[in-house]
Image (cartoon, rainbow, N blue to C red):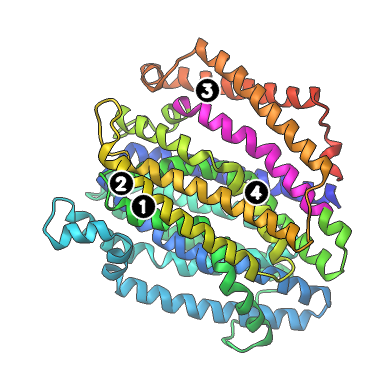
Amino acid sequence: MMSKLFRSSLITSVATFMSRILGLIRDVFIAGILGAGQSSDVLFFAQRIPNFLRRLFAEGAFSQAFVPVMAEFKAKKDKEGLNDLISHTSGTLGALVFLITILGMLGSHVVTAIFGWGWFEEWLHDGPEGGKFVQASFLLKITTPYLFFITLTAVSGAILNTFEKFLIPAITPCLMNLCMIASCICIAPYTEDPNFALSLGFLAGGVVQFAFQLPFLYRLGCLVKPKISWNHPGVAKIRKLMLPAIFSVSVSQINLIINTIIATNLATGAISYLYYSDRLLEFPIGIFGVAIGTVILPALSRQFAKKDNDGYVKTMDWGIRLVLLLGFPAMMGIIMLREPIVRVLYMRGEFGLDAAGHVGLSVIASVSGLWAIMLVRVLAPGFNARQDTATPVRYGIISMITNICCSLIIVFPLEKYLEIDGGLGYGYLGLALATTVSAVLNATLLLCGLARKNIYHVSRSTVLFIIKLLAGTAIMSVGLSFIREYFAENIEAWASLGLLASIVYLSVLIVAGALIYFVSLFALGIRPSHLRGV
């Protein structure tokens, strides 16, 4: 069982890796065209709102509610009943999101005022940054329809995952990134407003992703006519599970949107600094955390339906070991190599040394919570697979409130009083730190909740495994600190290097760090067998 899950995770990880690489290439183009200032702040705002709603209504919450119910229907081997569930679920969710999309487009000024309050106040009082509110409202009219298409894509992907067809949903986001890259190369350079071209590429990505999955649904016999029925038994069950799951699964996204609201009250560039550092955070989460969480939910759902408690516990143990095996070194590696990473990925065109320094600081604060965010991807399915979404929602609300409180306590003193190298405007670091604190608290509450409900207890062997991982990560960090002294010490030194030299040096450091880490783990007694079976 563990070997099958490992293969599924590997397939999903490789496909997701391709998507994340293309995502980084997309961000490289955007950074070169827009830099980190007013234009990039507005674009990332206009994309973040529909992405937030996507996570709220589609990928996270919907998948966590839909997959267990669909697995239950599938276990009964009733093809007609299964297709009836798909028909009513897709039709009902699609109609709801279509209505939200239309309202969002018509009321884009209201949406921008709610989520971009700082910009709205500037516009209301004829402030110098009032133009951000006007442009963001216009771009939202273009980007909001993305929500409708990506929601249908999420429904299709959840169906394919339930049938253990993990590759297609995993490579689908590649198409989104390709559309954005194409708009950067073919349209943006020839338009007066590059943001308009990039927003069109964003919308096109949603349409293309949905169309791509349709033939594969047809082959499974699951491409059915959508029907609307709020009271269909399956839809009612999904609705009951989905409403609390919106909070429990989407806590990190809700935190991001709260950060966006606060960031519109900070200095220009705050949203962009957080976006670029968040992209580095999302890279390992997407490759490892999402991949493992994607394959673990159907497995746990099947084991719960079959009352296989022993297999359930082993699957949870396997997931925790694997995400921490990859999460700890990814966290420390990104933090220690932030200067060369920012130099290689972003420093070109409109993206200069000052922006690189700000993003580097944001990386430290953001990536510190990487391991916790990845752990949540495994722990939350431990509840959701049992169709218990009420418990995680309580933890999600507690974490969200903690994030808000920490943000308000930390952000504005940093913005007003912190001075680094003679510059002010570092409140965005408080937002990143608050998100990290919230993620750690959420993971801790989920783990304690599983133990309290006697669903899962961390075994002694897994505790020892984690201690060895921490030791290996510490050894890797010490080794990297010595090796990097032979290249460059800070962002100014890296900026003075040519792009090719920076790429070569960064590659050497990454390979060296990986070798040190895995050799250390081998010396500490960790073997591949510790992941094949628990």
Circle 2 residue: 412
The residue under label 4 is which amino acid type? Answer: Leu
Mark 3 vs mark 4, CA separation in Å = 27 Å
Circle 1 residue: 408
Mark 2 vs mark 3, CA separation in Å = 35 Å
Name the side, left or right, on which 134 lies relative to 2. Answer: left
* Label 4 element class: helix
**Are the residues at dot 1 and dot 2 in contact (C-beta closer than 8 Å)?**
yes
* Residue at 63% in and 66% down: 63
Circle 3 residue: 506
* Span highlighted in magenta in the image: 314-340
Residue 375's tag is 4
Between disc 3 and disc 1, the foreground one is 1
Front position in the image: 251 or 33: 251
Q: How far across and down, in percent of the image, does residue 265 sit?
A: 27, 52
Between disc 1 and disc 4, the foreground one is 1
* Label 1 element class: helix
Between disc 2 and disc 3, the foreground one is 2
